[in-house]
Every structure is written in C-alpha cells, then in structure tokens.
Amino acid sequence: DIDARVLAVLDHGRFIMGPEVGELESRLADYVGVRHAITCGNGTDAIQLALMAHGIGANDAVFVPSFTFSASAEPVAMLSATPVFVDIADNSYNICMDSLQSAFQRITDSAELAPRAVIAVDMFGSPANYPALEAFCEANSLVLIQDAAQSFGARLGDRRCGAFGDIATTSFFPAKPLGCYGDGGAVFTDNDELAEVIRSLRVHGKGSHKYENLRVGVNSRLDTIQAAVLLAKLDAFDVELEQRQRVREQYDALLAPAFQTQHLADDAHSAWAQYSILPNDGERTTYTSALTEAGIPSQIYYPVPLHEAPAYAPYRSLAEPCTSAAAMSARVFSTPMHPHLSSEQIEQVARCLLVAAGL
C-alpha cells in the first residue's frame, strides 16, 4: 500500500502540497474528532505555529514541563518568549498541577512577565491531566497547547489526544506511533479563525496566493510523499495500537516484581510510544548494561531535564524546583516497544531484566 501510494505521487509530480496532503488532513481531523488538522514540516514547527498563531513572544511566559525533549520548549525561546520549567508527577511523568500552580502564582506576582500559555506534554504516549489543565487554564486566561507528539491515537475518556486544550500538536517522526518516512507534524483545532491563520503561517504568511504576504510566517509544509506514507499507515494504525497495548500488558505482568511502570488515569488509554520503567532497586546502568550484553536495545528518555540543560541556563532562575523531573531523568529507562514484538521477545527482555535484578 505504501509503495502504491508513493508511486502515485511520483507519477503526478505534485511533491509539495499535493492532493494526498489534503486527503490526509481530512482523515486526521476525522480521526481525532476536531474541525481542522493542518499538517506541517515537523512536530517542533507545529508547536511554533501554535505559539505564533496566538501572538506569543517577548515578555510572555510559557509553562513547560522540565521532563521532555527540547522541542517542547525550543519554539518558546525561539519566539523570544520565556519558558518557565515546572515539575512532573513522578508516577505519570506528566506535568504536575501543584508545580504549575506555584509557577503561575510566582510569575503573576512578579509582574515581570505576562503568563500566556501552558504546553502540556503527553509523556511516552500517556495523556496528561486535561480535566485539571483545562479548568486551570480557563480560570487564568492561559492558552493550553497539547503536545501530543508521542500520544497520537491515545484517549482520555471518549476524547482522542489532539482534541484537548485550545490547540494541539503532534509529530510524525519515524519513531512515533504514527510515523512517516522522514519529518512531519500537524496542528489540530476546532477554531476556524485559528486554523486559517496557521494555514497562512506555514506557507510564509501567505494570503489568497503565495505572493500576497499577510503576515511573517515560516516554510513548514508536509511534503506529499510523507502524506502518502501516512495515509497507508493510518489504515493499519488502530490495529497497531491494539498490538502496543498487548505488548504493554505482557511487560507489566512480567516485570511487576522488580519495576514500577507508568501510572495511567482510570479512563486513559496510552499510545505507548515508549515503554518506560523505574527500577525498585539498583542503578539504571545495571539494567541497561545487562540488556546491551544480551544484544537487546534500550533507551534513556531524557537523561538531562531541560531546566538543567545548558541551552536553557538563561531561564534556570525562573524554574520551579523540579525534583521529580531530575529523579526520573536519572532513573527511568525504556525497553523495546513496537507493535510487532513477539511474546517470546518480550519474555527475553523481561528475563534479562529480572536476572539483573537478582530474581
């Protein structure tokens, strides 16, 4: 299916904003349950477009969890706004409401910056606490941006990730649950006016044609071949989500004696972009080294919390105490996770880890 769709693009030759892009946007919007899905060059650009569409820039404060990839905070700094790093809840790895409230009150009281937005990251594919986040942001006139780079396909109650907050973003980087064969991203919104602004911003701020520049924008279009790949993969996506859930359940059952797994709300369904675990005892390197020796890959997300990263040193004094973020950066690691892992492979991973734990 992927080959056929890519060959069709090579045949018609509309490599930028070809018909597959519009088809994909329509299907993505229907899948998520929103009025508009606007594709773009990558997930980082998606966040930048969301910020730009809301006019966020100099002297504005944007609250970002410290335990995430740099792409969640980078667009904030690039637009001359100020990222204010907050802590995570240590059992879910998602943004901590107490830390967020503390940071908001502190920034408000100082009156040096204007609190404007919250970027909520759905860590490892698990939805953040959106009932609390939406209520908090509405009460305090903050824009809520859902960073669903890892959680496309996940649900909280009867709503899919991509449908929360004022605006949502995702990534189609190859390692994501729905990944293309290069870079890609999308922005989701129910707001017609906001969607029109984002469509303009992603193509140099264009108006009715590309030489009518209504605003300063960027060049961030999803190329047609990537849209073709995503259309084919979207057909199989729900089945792959079910297979990821199967992998998670088998891991949970096998690893429970020695490891803590990510906590989900009762009505949450994760996309399981990553399967990350926390050892009850011992150093992380004990387990990652054992996996390496057995020829099994592992990964660490994220070894340095953003409030400690050199690039964000200018903002460090504004950060909340991010003790949980620092602790998880030092202890959490991820095992292989993809929909085609066999039961035997999962057992092989688990045996290696349990032996390393002395069990």
Image (cartoon, grey):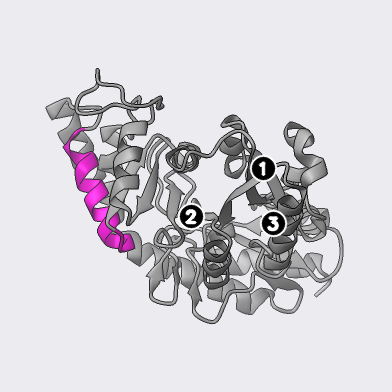
Q: State whether residue 123 is above or below residue 225.
A: below
Q: Examine the structure image and report whether residue 26 is included in the region drawn in magenta.
A: yes
Gap between marks 3 and 1 measured at Cα: 12 Å
Mark 1 Cα shell of 10 Å, populated few (<14), some (14-19), many (≥20): many
Judged from the image, the secondary structure of the residue bearing numbered disc 2 is loop
**Which residue is at the front of the view, 51 or 18?**
51
Q: Which residue type carries mark 2?
A: Ala
Name the spot of residue 268 as percent of width and height, x first: 50, 74
Judged from the image, the secondary structure of the residue bearing numbered disc 3 is helix
Q: Are marks 2 and 3 in contact (CB under 8 Å)?
A: no
At x 25% / y 47%, what residue is drawn? 24
Image side of residue 32 versus residue 111, left or right: left
Give the magenta-colored segment's residue range.
18-34
**Which residue is at the front of the view, 337 or 235?**
235
First in sequence, mark 3 or 1: give its number: 1
- The numbered dot on residue 83 is 1
Name the spot of residue 320 as percent of width and height, x first: 79, 53
- In the picture, the quarter occupied by the C terminus is bottom right
Image side of residue 40 versus residue 311, left or right: left
Q: Nearer the viewer, mark 2 or mark 3?
A: 3
User: Mark 3 — residue?
Assistant: 104
User: Mark 2 — residue?
Assistant: 148
First in sequence, mark 2 or 3: give its number: 3
Q: Which residue type carries mark 3?
A: Phe
Gap between marks 2 and 3 measured at Cα: 22 Å
Mark 2 Cα shell of 10 Å, populated few (<14), some (14-19), many (≥20): many
